[in-house]
Amino acid sequence: MAAAKIVHVYQVGDVVRTTESFGPNQAGSIGIVYESYADHDANAPRVISVLLMNGHDIGSFSGEEQTESLVWLGQIGLTYSYSNPAQLMRDYREGYFDQAFTEARVIAEQPHVGSVLYP
């Protein structure tokens, strides 16, 4: 019997690990939730958007996609107000996320933190 997937209610500042490849980004990549918004279906979990440590925005994830594609690792207390893709990339290049990714790396390297094989 397969292990049940853990459903997490994601919010901005959550640290995640991917469970599959996204373009050139391998499974196991570390990212941060930078946006959370209501789905058109009021009964569905919020949609989230994820930025990887290398600056790749891997897009938005609905509730089922979150469960299948992401493992929650922790929360770093990041506050970010997303406005548009160009501003997100500008903020990344200018170092807005540097401290957040430093903290995310520390969380991801802790023993017994969710991994691709053992969420």
Image (cartoon, grey):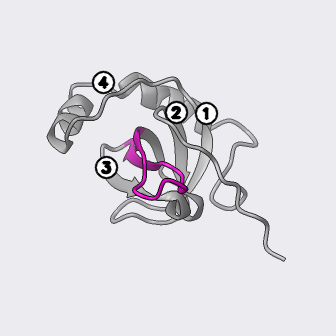
Q: Which residue type carries mark 1?
A: Ile
Q: Which residue type carries mark 3?
A: Asp
Spatial CA span between label 3 and label 2: 16 Å
Closer to the chain start, of discs 4 and 2, is 4
Q: Which mark is residue 104?
A: 2
Contact between marks 1 and 3 (CB within 8 A): the answer is no
Contact between marks 1 and 2 (CB within 8 A): the answer is yes
Q: Which residue type carries mark 2?
A: Ala
Q: Which residue type carries mark 4?
A: Tyr
Give the SS element for disc 1.
helix
Left-right relation of 65 to 87: right
Q: Residues within 10 Å of mark 1 (few under 14, many from 20)?
A: some
Left-right relation of 56 to 107: left
Query: Residue at horizontal 42%, vertical 47%?
Result: 38
Left-right relation of 8 to 35: right
Which residue is labeled 1 in the image?
107
Closer to the chain start, of discs 3 and 2, is 3
Query: Residue at horizontal 28%, vertical 34%?
Result: 82
Closer to the chain start, of discs 1 and 3, is 3
Q: How many marks?
A: 4
